Image (cartoon, coloured by chain):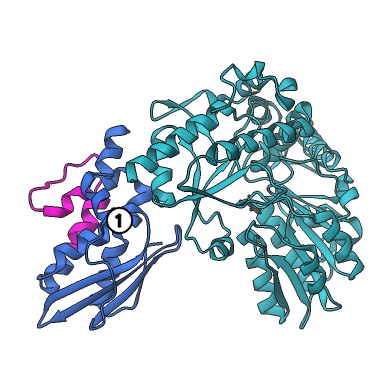
Chain colours: A blue, B cyan
Amino acid sequence: MKNELNDLYQEVILDHNKNPRNFGDMHDANHSAAGHNPLCGDHIDVDLKVKDGIIEDVKFHGAGCAISKASASIMTTTLIGQSVEEAKEMFKQFVDIVTTDPEEEIDTLNLGKLAVFCGVREFPARVKCASLAWHTMKNALDDESGASTE
Amino acid sequence: MSFNQNSPTTVSAGAMMTFNINKIRADFPILQTEVNGHPLVYLDNAASTQKPQVVIDSITKYYTEQNSNIHRGVHHLSELATKLYENARKTIAKFISADPKEIIYTRGATESINLVVSTYGRKFIGEGDEIIITEMEHHSNIVPWQMLCEEKGAKLRILRMNDNGEISIDNFKEMLNEKTKFVSIVHISNSLGTINPVKEMIDLTHEAGAVFLLDGAQSIQHVAVDVKALDCDFFVVSGHKLYGPTGIGFLYGKKEFLEAMPPYQGGGDMILSVNFEKTVFNEVPYKFEAGTPNIAGAVGLAEAIKYIDGIGIDKIAAYETELLDYATAVVADIPELRIIGTAANKTSVLSFVLSNVHPHDIGTFLNADGVAIRTGHHCTEPVMHKFKIPATSRASISFYNTKEEIDVFVASVKKVIKMFS
Ligand SMILES: Cc1ncc(COP(=O)(O)O)c(C=O)c1O
């Protein structure tokens, strides 16, 4: 349990929780969505500025646990400069990471910063925390205004 | 810290004297288990309580030697099962000073409230009538009333609470009027621990000509309840919070109300005779018990009540208060911790938030130390809105807990705070 807990709450996650990147409002966003996890009361707003199919800027704000906050923060840092298609691909990849059976190996080689979320799958109750920001981002890109991980 | 490090059996203060905690803990097999390599510290008793061996044995014995369907059977096992089921009803009735005919078996508090809403509520509450609940109700005492109000055009009125999580009798008096038809209120709050001044509220409700339902889901296991002395019209209970099995609970209702109410569900056992032209309903309480019931559940629940009675609810109350006072005093030293629910009159629940850690993270870390608490809104979302927080962490106490367990819990909380600072 100790090791699994350390895998879940890695230094990087604690750091992003404490000092979230790209946290705040965006006034010239052209894609936005609100995400909500009714079970634990977490909520998050994701704003994106997309130009010519490229994500120029991402910001988020809201309240949630360390896992959901760090996940949102790390997500914003990986998305800036990516194309919308790449962002949607990363969304799929992220959902895979946190839902793969713990017995199965995950190839972390191509995961980059997202690899720190491999530990989440050991904690079924926390999968929704980790994926809330990603679902919200995807909804924003698809121009659906709300997301819920319940 | 100023607590006593000795074995709890030798603690000299107050209720501890008359309470053999080691013997009690030995009665609950699950308390001997480990979680994540640590002895289980079970502080999630408001969600569900653990079961003593006698309850587990009674269910095993029922299925091993006594099982059959009840009522109308002429063979030995059917008569035996019927007797056990009806004796269980008597045990329940005696525990709250009611008549067995006033006890209706249900799946639990939720179903009991729904039964009252959809029978009494549907028949006697109409357009423009008012129903009063409090801001601290469990969702099960909010949503059924909202559904009824939607259907009937009645109005749901909310009695607010102060920042300690207390309601005021004066505010309640102001809300009561000739339109008030029903008052449905939680006896002890599951998310705050507040003990509400229900005797006074029941009397005021009756003076206003309205009917009172008391939600006892969190009270019957912590304080003595005498429905006749309280004079409530309905009282609802979940067996699994009272050291009994899940899937069984009961509704107490005054006989004159039960007789005036239409049946709840239709089917076998709730009828005297069935003809396609006219069906005659059975007498109370059977009128409300359609279909084959949870017989083993009733047997287990009665056994749990006998167990509690054997220890004595007053001793349990005194010991649990002492534990809560202890826990409250110890966490007062933690500057990052704020207690949610600081009513002058409270019991068994320590809800809190930490300034730097979200409840979900707290719950996960405590679990790694074998400590079971609950995090979230505890099915009382309006309470979270009132305190402007998304969720709380809640440690809820039972008489089988110890000061040593509180210490393990507090040490674990301190560790989390440090980790996130
Ligand atoms: C105050 C209160 N009322 C009602 C309920 C509903 O109980 P059940 O889910 O067992 O029907 C609960 C359970 O948490 C409760 O705490």
Q: Quadrant of residue B111?
A: bottom right
In this view of the protein, which residue sits in the foreground, A72 or B150? A72
Residue at the image point whose x is 66% and y is 53% from the top: B189
Q: Find out whether residue A104 is within the magenta segment.
A: yes
Look at the image and tell me whether residue B293 can be seen.
no
In this view of the protein, which residue sits in the foreground, B35 or B16? B16
A10 shown above or below B358? above
Q: Answer with left or right where residue B81 lies relative to residue A126.
A: right
In this view of the protein, which residue sits in the foreground, B153 or B163? B163
Give percent across and percent down for residue B226: 85, 45
Q: Quadrant of residue B17?
A: top right
B191 shown above or below B120? above
Residue at the image point whose x is 24% and y is 51% from the top: A15
B37 shown above or below A8? above
Give percent across and percent down for residue B69: 72, 41
Secondary element under disc 1, as helix, strand or loop, is: helix
Q: Find out whether residue B33 is within the magenta segment.
A: no
Disc 1: which residue = A130
Look at the image and tell me whether residue B239 can be seen.
yes
Extreme residue in the left direction:
A109
Q: Quadrant of residue B271?
A: bottom right
Give percent across and percent down for residue B90: 84, 39
Residue at the image point whose x is 78% and y is 30% from the top: B312
Q: Which residues are magenta?
A: A89-116
The type of residue carrying mark 1 is: Ala
Q: Answer with left or right where residue A49 lies relative to residue B319.
A: left
Chain of the residue under the numbered disc 1 shown in the image: A
